[in-house]
Structure formats: C-alpha cells, structure tokens
Image (cartoon, rainbow, N blue to C red):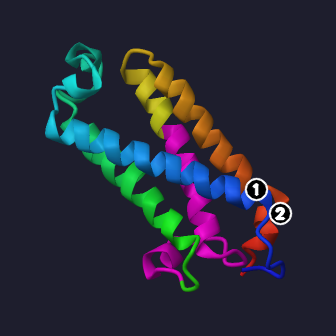
C-alpha cells in the first residue's frame, strides 16, 4: 500500500461497493445462464427485440464474468499483498497498484454496460441503481485518498 497504513474511508467504501457489484453480477449472471428466457429475474424476452440477442444467455455470460467474477477478483485483491499477473498486464497506470487501475476499469465497464443496455432494452430501475454504482466506483477510485493509498 502507499505510505499510509490506515485505510481511508473512501477505500472501505470502494471495497464494499465492488463487493456489492460482484454479488449482483454473479447472481444475475447465473440466473440468466441457467434460465436464458429471463423468467427467473422477471426479464421478458420481448425486451431483447431491438438487441442482437434472441435470449439472455450471452448477456448472462457477460454479466457473470465481466461484472461478477472480475469484481470478485478485484475485491479479493484488496486483501492480497501480491497482485495477480493478469491485473498487472492491463495496468496502464504504472505509478498505481494494479488493484487501483482495475477498479477504475471496472467502473468504466459498468457505466458502458448500462449505457449499452439502455440503448437495446426497456428501461429498468436497476439500470439507474447500477449506473450509479459505476459512477460511485469511478469517483471513489479517483478520490485523492484512494490514489495516495494505492501508489505503487
């Protein structure tokens, strides 16, 4: 970690917001993979009529891996002293630890996911909630105390 050994409040908030996303992504992804007709989550198939998908299988796989597994790995990385090689490979901010840059990427991915979702499917209140979660991840990641804490 950076020079400070006490985790700032913004770091704690970031960790738990990412855990919230991971749980939601894993749950939603599993439901859509197991039941691609969307009935388990009460997502009507007709909401996909303007999308490139016939059912929710591919969106479920994307949700499971990109917004479930990936944030779970980031969450675990907050508690590891060494980082995973794949997280270092994508770290373009060499002055920051890879968990920091991957948190930033995650926030951007989530906001983009919600944007694309809003283009293709009917509006849902969950889009607002998760859009705000994405914005919160970005804001918390670029908070000065978080940047300082995760200096390489």
Residue at coordinates 55% horizontally, 39% vertically from top-left?
A: 111
**Residue most toward the bottom?**
82
Counting from the top left corner in percent of width and height, residue 121 is at 36, 20
Q: Looking at the picture, tell me which residue is in the foreground, 124 or 47.
A: 124
Identify the residue under disc 2.
145
Residue at coordinates 51% horizontally, 47% vertically from top-left?
A: 20
Q: Quadrant of residue 58?
A: top left
Q: Is residue 109 above or below residue 38?
A: below
Q: Earlier in the sequence, mark 1 or mark 2?
A: 1
- Quadrant including the C terminus: bottom right
As drawn, the label of residue 10 is 1
Q: Is residue 65 magenta?
A: no
Question: Is disc 1 placed on a helix, strand or loop?
Answer: helix
Q: Is residue 41 above or below residue 92?
A: above
Q: Looking at the picture, tell me which residue is in the foreground, 109 or 25.
A: 25
Part of the protein shown in magenta: 83-112
Other residues around mark 1 within 10 Å, as few (<14) / some (14–19) / many (≥20): some
- For the residues labelled 1 and 2, the Cα–Cα distance comes to 7 Å
Residue at coordinates 28% horizontally, 21% vertically from top-left?
A: 43
Q: Is residue 107 magenta?
A: yes
Q: Is residue 10 left or right of residue 126?
A: right
Residue at coordinates 71% horizontally, 61% vertically from top-left?
A: 11
Magenta highlight: main SS: helix
- Asked if marks 1 and 2 touch (Cβ < 8 Å), the reply is yes
């Amino acid at each position: 970690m950076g020079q400070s050994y006490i985790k700032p409040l913004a770091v704690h908030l970031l960790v738990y917001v990412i855990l919230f996303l991971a749980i939601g992504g894993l749950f939603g992804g599993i439901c859509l993979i197991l039941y691609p007709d969307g009935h388990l989550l009460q997502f009507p198939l007709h909401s996909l009529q303007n999308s490139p998908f016939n059912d929710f299988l591919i969106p479920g796989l994307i949700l499971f891996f990109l917004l479930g597994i990936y944030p779970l790995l980031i969450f675990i990385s907050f508690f590891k002293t060494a980082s995973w090689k794949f997280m270092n490979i994508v770290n373009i901010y060499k002055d920051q630890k890879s968990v920091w840059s991957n948190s930033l990427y995650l926030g951007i991915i989530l906001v983009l996911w919600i944007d694309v979702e809003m283009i293709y499917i009917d509006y849902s209140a969950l889009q607002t909630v998760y859009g705000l979660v994405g914005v919160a991840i970005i804001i918390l990641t670029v908070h000065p105390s978080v940047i300082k804490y995760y200096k390489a």
